Amino acid sequence: MGLHTAPTTSFSQSFPSYPYFGAHVFSYTELEQATHNFHPSKELGDGGFGTVYYGELKDERSVAVKRLYENSLKHVEQFITEIEILTKLRHTNLVTLYGCTSRHSRELLLVYEYIPNGTVADHLHGRNSNSVLLPWPVRLSIAVETADALAFLHTSEVIHRDVKTNNILLENNFRVKVADFGLSRLFPTNVTHVSTAPQGTPGYVDPEYYQCYKLTDKSDVFSFGVVLIELISSLEAVDTNRHRHDINLATMAVNKIQNQALSELVDQSLGFERDYAVRSMVTSVAELAFRCLQQDREIRPSMQEVVQVLKGIQDEHFRK
């Protein structure tokens, strides 16, 4: 992973003004010190938007500092979107934004609460997947909390647009924090869709959005359906090592469920074959995922309905 050198000019020269929406403004020097000058050993991960570093502020708060890759209008817009959404919205399952740098800074940096236990992707099929198995009750809880956060976003007129297991962070007690709002869009309630070029991550993008360039809250529902299948199967959303018909997990899952071959999809370590309660819950979640993954977005449930179904499954088996 290469280091990204800071531009010598300030962002104010290319983007003369951006709003802070009441966010705390950090100095570049303060964040440079907090991350040991963005030392490679402090890297937590990276994506299309920027590299994230672990840092410690002078007040001893642990933070995650996101550093944009380059000075471009697109990235500035994503930066502003994150600030606007995360300063307006508060939810127990959304990551907290502590602040950002000013437009006069050498770089655009976003500062979040540090979530210590990695991502859901790490635990399902990444660097933590061999250390501690995520048991089924924890996976179901992750599904419920993620759905709850997305339903909250939708009622707040926000579409996440990049729902995936890499953007679902976990605290040490496996509580969920949904993150990464760089691609999110504000979605007024008086419109049916937003026309925009499809963006997102391969394997998670709503096929109708991809074909018609129409973004709706049901686009997040499709992506969440893929997350549900990942939780059931421990498989990645896209894997070119699988059979060509199974490279895309959503397609593979729909085919398996339609052909009543769910057992071929499920991670057998969850106890699907030997535990009736687990089999019953996994089957119910798979049926919900199948609805979320429908090509026709009109058939997909709303995120609010998804929450109700998942909580119903949880209540039936764990809260008697």
Image (cartoon, grey):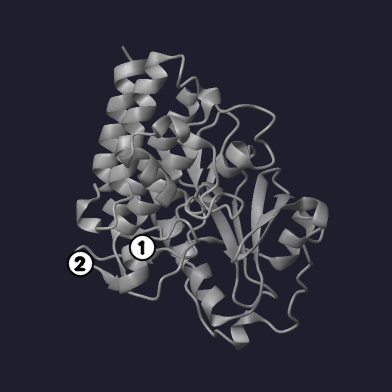
Label 1 or label 2, whichever comes before in sequence order: 2
Q: Is residue 238 above or below residue 216?
A: above
Q: Secondary structure at mark 1?
A: helix
Contact? badges 1 and 2 (CB < 8 Å):
no
Q: Secondary structure at mark 2?
A: loop
Badge 1 is on which residue? 207
Q: Amino acid at mark 2?
A: Thr
Residue 281, horizontal then vertical, whole percent: 36, 24
Mark sitting on residue 192:
2
Most extreme residue toward the left is 190
Mark in front: 1 vs 2:
1
Report the Cα–Cα distance between label 1 and label 2. 17 Å
Most extreme residue toward the bottom is 13
| Residue shown at 34% from the left, 17% from the top | 317
Residue 228, horizontal then vertical, whole percent: 42, 40
| Residue shown at 76% from the left, 55% from the top | 35
Front in this rendered view, residue 147 or 249? 249
